[in-house]
Image: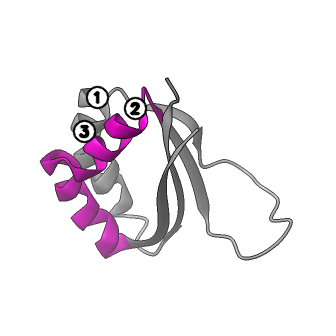
Amino acid sequence: MAKGYWIVRVSVHDRDRYPDYLAAAEPAFEKFGANFIVSGGPFDSMEGTSRDRNVVVEFKDLATAKACYQSPEYQAAKAIRQRCSEADFIIIEG
């Protein structure tokens, strides 16, 4: 069965509040078995536009990746993230 992935590019506007998002999202990540493949780090933008942070999160399958995003736990965290950052966010099967 193919894995499911979150691919997220984030520009953080309020670095003091961003850790609040991460803390709020942790229960959803634990509940749905999120495995962080890439979490920030240095990068080279070769083409197109980029954001400050790039994140790739692996889940056991596409349904689990979607369920995590749609969960009440993550939706509460997302509200915090949206107040302190701007993101491009896709869920993809791979």
Which image quadrant: the C terminus? top right
- Farthest-out residue, front: 1
The answer to whether the residue labelled 3 contacts the one labelled 1, judged by CB atoms less than 8 Å apart, is yes
Q: Which residue is mark 3?
A: 28
Q: Residue 57, image x and y in percent?
A: 49, 40
Q: Which span is picked out in magenta? A: 58-84
Q: Which residue is mark 1?
A: 30
Q: Residue at x 41, y 71 (%)?
A: 85
**Helix, strand or loop under label 3:** helix
Q: Residue at x 49, y 23 (%)?
A: 1
Q: Amino acid at mark 3?
A: Ala
Please tell me whether residue 16 is drawn above or below residue 69 in the rendered image.
Answer: below
* Label at residue 34: 2
In magenta stretch: residue 59: yes
Q: Is residue 75 left or right of residue 92?
A: left
Q: Is residue 62 left or right of residue 44?
A: left
Q: Residue 11, image x and y in percent?
A: 53, 70
Q: Earlier in the sequence, mark 3 or mark 2?
A: 3
Please tell me whether residue 2 is drawn above or below residue 67 in the rendered image.
Answer: above
The answer to whether the residue labelled 3 contacts the one labelled 2, judged by CB atoms less than 8 Å apart, is yes
Q: Quadrant of residue 49?
A: bottom right
The answer to whether the residue labelled 1 contacts the one labelled 2, judged by CB atoms less than 8 Å apart, is yes
Q: Quadrant of residue 83?
A: bottom left
Q: Amino acid at mark 1?
A: Glu
Q: Residue 3, image x and y in percent?
A: 50, 31
Q: Amino acid at mark 2?
A: Ala
